[in-house]
């Protein structure tokens, strides 16, 4: 286990600032949310206090802490900087800032006096976070923002020292991760004597701008300095030598993949659980999701290329028209249900290029004008019929999920009122960055990179997402999930329109996130997990901050199998013959104990087709089996289960467009129950008849049941 658990001390679990803040959360979000915020803050502060004591001694912090640094850096025997990094692991758009503020309020009651809050390098977002701290921690520490000390950092720091503000009330310094602002803050901290007080640095979106962006370049042999922001944060940490560095993010892939001795690698992790009403990956991307709608990839290609003409008629492509029609009817439905709901949002994210934003806006606006005129009978009768058919099509779709959908003619009346002044708005760096301006009723937003971290789209009902990078970054794509958030009341009319490959990528990323959260929940302090590789088209994060840098996840306790076994007779016939010989001493229907090496050897005789986005890859599975036997897991035994119908083989059909699953659910459940701690390989011999679309050659189809346990397989190919 980590050194985090070596020494523990009691902490204060209440205080004026903390209790008042929880009351505020309860008033805004309900008692359940307040209770959850309290539990998470307690967990955060316990870990911070324990980590601080392990690194710097037991007198400064905790329920009886002095609030002063008793063993400054200059007097410590060990000159090596301790790793005092922790992680607050939340979910996208789940209210992590609330937990951060609660943690600051409780930390103040436990001897911490200096708090640095680092935000994204965006003035608007930084200002909003600073305002939140000022307005909501009214009985807590004094809060300042970067603009307060910008003109005279030295003088500002000296005034804090002269007022003894750190010892008196404690101080929160909020700054964006702009290198100039960080440098000025370092001056403030030095002049204020902040090194004499226990500190916590909260790095919001710590995986975004805080890592060393030149790490990969140096790994390739280039003589380059560490990235500027990373270096400046390092200097801040040096100035506040007795501190805890608390990273806050919903996408920690790049943090978990830092080397064990890296200052950005977390040593402890606290899960932040969303409150009641949160809608996330499970609702959008789990297998049973009813709100996904597939769009033909060529539609997004046309929109990106500008080939969609802006002429007469409903020129918008089919998927976009469906999305807009569903959105308009959904707005009408929710407005009728709850007149207090004043605005609703539609988000179109197709490309990062600004010229494409303009093109997409033109297409949307043209369609809205056509729909408006057609429904009012201002165009031809055929146009009116076509427009009404658009709404009827969307109505039929919404009827699949909305239990109390109003009559179509009633909804159409509302839609007609909405259309007259409805226009799409662009959100990008040319139009105010992350600031979102709303009008009453429906809002349609078009954008690119700015529609990511920190952007909250109120009452987002329909998402039209077509951004499909050649190399998908898990953290970036996950942060694009602006549809997540506290919007359960809209779920029955919520939709996400995208291509099947993009939806599958979101699903895989959701599963990866859930797997990592399960792992952290089981082993919150033992985060030394060896990175392992998942595939060339899904990376955890941008390559420049990692070495190695390709990542994916396989979930423990799951059954995995090839998309399709190779079955051509010329290749497979001799392999099947070899397998028959290797397996002749193993009785069918029995779970035989064998070495893990043996099932790895067997799998070499069962090659499979590769498919992008599918979890099974022959080399990848071999690597999993090697990792199981390593020092971290020490799994050396396995089970094999053979079925061949007494040599005749099964007669499963080869599927087109879908995976060929061969294992029986009852057998999988039996293996999970009885042998869940080791991998189990199921081998089902197939007849391989051409009648089942094979090649008239018997072959074995494998299914590998991964061992249970709260660990995550991450693969690196570097």
Image (spheres, helix red, strand yellow):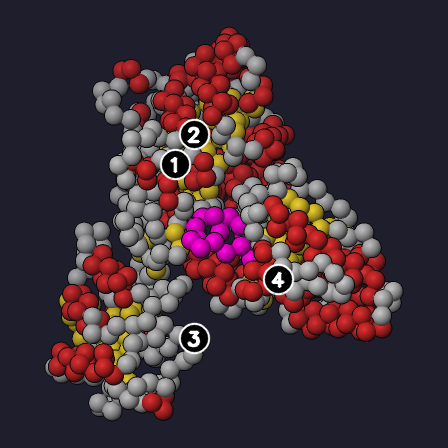
Q: Which mark is residue 348?
A: none
Q: Earlier in the sequence, mark 2 or mark 4?
A: 2
Q: Quadrant of residue 493?
A: bottom right
Q: Is disc 1 placed on a helix, strand or loop?
A: loop
Q: For the residues marked 3 and 2, what is the alpha-carbon distance in whole angstroms?
A: 46 Å
Q: Which residue carries the number 4 mark? A: 495
Residue picked out by circle 3: 658
Residue 230 within the magenta-colored segment of the rendering: no
Mark 2 and mark 1 lie on one chain; the one further toward the N terminus is 1
Query: Percent position (x, y) of residue 710?
Result: 33, 56
Which residue position holds label 1? 213
| Mark 2 residue element | helix
The reply, left or right, for residue 665 in relation to residue 594 is right
Q: Earlier in the sequence, mark 3 or mark 1?
A: 1
Task: In the displayed orientation, state which residue is furthest to the top.
Answer: 162
Q: Nearer the viewer, residue 173 or 502?
A: 502
Query: Does residue 407 lie above or below 126 as drawn?
Result: below
């Amino acid at each position: 286990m980590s050194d985090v658990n070596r020494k523990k001390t009691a902490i204060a679990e209440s205080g004026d600032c903390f209790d008042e803040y929880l009351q505020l959360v309860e008033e805004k979000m309900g008692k359940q949310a307040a209770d959850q915020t309290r539990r998470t803050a307690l967990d955060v502060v316990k870990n911070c206090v324990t980590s601080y004591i392990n690194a710097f001694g037991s007198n400064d912090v905790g329920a009886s802490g002095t609030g002063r640094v008793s063993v400054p850096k200059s007097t410590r025997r060990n000159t090596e900087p301790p790793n005092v990094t922790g992680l607050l692991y939340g979910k996208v758009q789940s209210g992590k800032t609330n937990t951060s503020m609660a943690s600051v309020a409780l930390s103040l009651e436990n001897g911490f006096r200096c708090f640095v809050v680092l935000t994204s390098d965006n003035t608007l977002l930084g200002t909003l976070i600073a305002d939140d701290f000022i307005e909501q921690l009214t009985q807590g520490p004094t809060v300042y923002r970067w603009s307060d000390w910008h003109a005279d950092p030295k003088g500002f720091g000296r005034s804090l020292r002269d007022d003894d503000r750190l010892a008196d009330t404690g101080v929160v310094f909020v700054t964006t991760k702009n290198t100039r602002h960080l440098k000025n803050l370092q001056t403030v901290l030095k002049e204020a004597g902040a090194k004499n007080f226990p500190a916590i640095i909260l790095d919001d979106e710590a995986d975004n701008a805080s890592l060393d962006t030149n790490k990969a370049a140096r790994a390739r042999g280039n003589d380059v300095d560490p990235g500027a922001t990373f270096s400046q944060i390092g200097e801040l940490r040096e100035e506040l030598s007795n501190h805890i560095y608390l990273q806050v993010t919903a996408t920690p892939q790049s943090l978990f993949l830092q080397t064990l001795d890296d200052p950005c690698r977390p040593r402890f992790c606290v899960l932040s659980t969303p409150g009641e009403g949160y809608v996330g990956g499970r609702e959008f991307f789990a297998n049973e999701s009813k709100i996904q709608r597939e769009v033909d990839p060529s539609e997004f290609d046309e929109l990106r290329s500008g080939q969609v003409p802006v002429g007469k008629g409903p020129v918008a492509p089919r998927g976009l028209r469906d999305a807009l029609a569903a959105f308009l009817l959904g707005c009408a439905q929710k407005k009728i249900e709850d007149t207090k709901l004043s605005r609703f949002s539609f988000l179109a994210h197709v490309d990062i290029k600004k010229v494409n934003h303009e093109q997409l806006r033109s297409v949307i606006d043209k369609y809205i004008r056509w729909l408006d005129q057609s429904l009012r009978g201002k165009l031809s009768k055929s146009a009116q019929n076509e427009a009404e058919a658009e709404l009827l099509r969307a109505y039929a779709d919404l009827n699949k999920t909305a239990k109390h959908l109003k009559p179509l003619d009633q909804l159409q009346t509302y839609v007609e009122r909405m259309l007259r002044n409805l226009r799409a708005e662009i959100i990008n760096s040319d139009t105010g960055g992350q600031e979102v301006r709303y009008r009453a009723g429906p809002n349609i937003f078009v954008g690119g990179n700015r529609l990511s971290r920190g952007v909250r789209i109120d009452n987002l009902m329909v998402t039209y997402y077509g951004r499909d990078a050649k190399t998908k970054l898990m953290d970036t794509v996950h942060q694009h999930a602006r549809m997540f958030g506290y919007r359960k009341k809209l779920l029955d009319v919520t939709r996400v329109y995208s291509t099947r490959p993009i939806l599958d990528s979101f699903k895989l990323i959701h599963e990866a996130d859930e797997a990592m959260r399960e792992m952290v929940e089981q082993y919150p302090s033992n985060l030394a997990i060896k990175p392992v590789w998942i595939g060339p088209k899904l990376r955890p994060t941008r390559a420049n901050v990692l070495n190695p840098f390709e990542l994916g996840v396989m979930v423990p306790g799951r059954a995995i199998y090839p998309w399709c076994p190779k079955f051509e007779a010329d290749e497979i016939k001799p392999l099947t013959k070899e397998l028959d010989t290797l397996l002749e001493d193993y009785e069918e229907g029995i779970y035989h104990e064998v070495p893990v090496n043996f099932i790895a050897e067997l799998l070499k005789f069962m090659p499979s087709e590769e498919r992008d986005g599918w979890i099974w890859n022959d080399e990848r599975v071999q690597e999993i089996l090697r990792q199981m036997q390593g020092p971290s897991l020490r799994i050396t035994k396995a089970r094999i289960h053979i079925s061949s119908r007494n040599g005749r083989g099964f007669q499963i059909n080869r599927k087109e467009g879908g995976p060929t699953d061969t294992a029986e659910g009852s057998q999988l459940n039996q293996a999970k129950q009885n042998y869940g701690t080791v991998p189990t390989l199921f081998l089902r011999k197939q007849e391989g008849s051409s009648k089942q679309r094979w090649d008239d050659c018997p072959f074995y189809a494998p299914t590998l049941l991964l061992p249970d346990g709260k660990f995550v397989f991450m693969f690196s190919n570097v």
